[in-house]
Each structure stands twice: as C-alpha cells, then as structure tokens.
Amino acid sequence: MHSHELLREVIQKTSVKQIASDLNLSQSMIYKWAESDDGEGSGAVNPLDRIEQLIRSTQDRRLVQWICERAGGFFILNPKTNKPHPEYLIPATNEIVQEFADLLSVIALTAADNHITHKEAKQIRARWEELKSVTEGFVACCEEGNFTPLKDKSQPKA
C-alpha cells in the first residue's frame, strides 16, 4: 500500500478539519497528502514519505522505534530468510529460553530491593526488547519454514 492510499483511508475515518486544525495546516494540504504525487495527481509529498526518506537516509532504526513507542507499541525487525534448515531449530529454541532467563535475571536483580530505578527499568526494557526480537525472528522462520537466518547466526564469526 502506498502512503497516500493509507492516508486516504485514514482521513475517510476521521475529520480532515480536525487533522488540519491539530497540525495547523490547511484542509487542502491534508487532502493533497492523500493524492498520488507521481506526476499524474496533484498530491504533495506527505509526512509518511518523508519519514521513509529520513529512515532510508540515516539507516537509523531508532527513528522507527521512537514512532512505535509514541503509538504505544514497539518495532521488531523482520528477519531475512533464504533456504530451510530445520536442524537449527533446537539451538534457536535454546536461544529464546536463554534470552528469557536473562530477562528474568535482570528483573530479579533490579527488584531485589523492592525499588526499581529509572536506570534499572531501562535495563529491563533493553532485555525485553532483545527477547522480543529473538522470538520474532524465530517465529518468522517457523512461519516460512526457513531457518537459514538461525543457522547463519549460530556460525562462529571469523
């Protein structure tokens, strides 16, 4: 789906007048964002396209993570996949269990004094994000029947 198509769907379910007011822009600008800017339409480069350009330019996923956090969620990168190698299923499962154990260890250590500082909360969040990423990669490989990324990850680096 193109960004202007998504914006078109979004503005159909909400008030263009309200969006324009909230963003201190004209309603016509909001409508232009929902039109193609491929040369045939009179659309304008919209904020979604600008965000995509910024991410592509910087190659910094923290931008995506920040947006996801503002929306009440989190970002997990999809793994790259190639050919199936199911023999790597057990080590991958063990990695998830180890990540979960690491998370529980961090939680236990930080909660030992019945008080969790901001720094400790950040440590817990970091371990949680790592667990989610490892698990998402595993689940995606399962869905595709392709465990090459798990195999590649288990190979020692030269």
Image: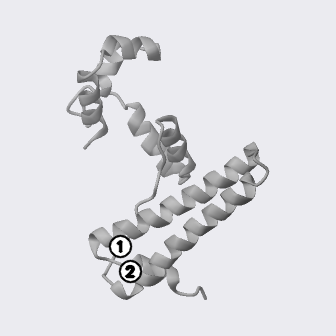
Q: Secondary structure at mark 1?
A: loop
62, 111: nearer the viewer: 111
- Residue 138 as seen in the image, left or right of residue 145: right
Q: Position of residue 25 (x, y in %)?
A: 42, 14
Vertical placement of residue 86 versus 39, above or below: below
Query: Quarter-wise, where is residue 48 in the image?
Result: top left
Please name the residue that numbered disc 2 is placed on.
148
Examine the rendering and report whether any part of residue 151 can be seen.
no
Which residue is at 63% across, 67% downward? 102
Q: Position of residue 130 (x, y in %)?
A: 56, 61
Q: Secondary structure at mark 2?
A: helix
Alpha-carbon neighbours of circle 2 within 10 Å: few (<14), some, or many (≥20)?
Answer: some
Vertical placement of residue 109 versus 95, above or below: above
Examine the rendering and report whether any part of residue 67 can be seen.
yes
- Residue 89 as seen in the image, left or right of residue 154: left
Marks 1 and 2: CB-CB under 8 Å? yes
Q: Position of residue 15 (x, y in %)?
A: 30, 15
The amino acid type, in three-letter code, at marker 1 is: Thr
Assign the N terminus to one quadrant of the image. Answer: top left
Q: Which mark is residue 81?
A: 1
The amino acid type, in three-letter code, at marker 2 is: Thr
Which residue is at 57% across, 56% downward? 128
Vertical placement of residue 148 versus 129, above or below: below
Number of numbered discs overlaid on the protein picture? 2
- Residue 68 as seen in the image, left or right of residue 41: right
Q: Position of residue 93 (x, y in %)?
A: 45, 76
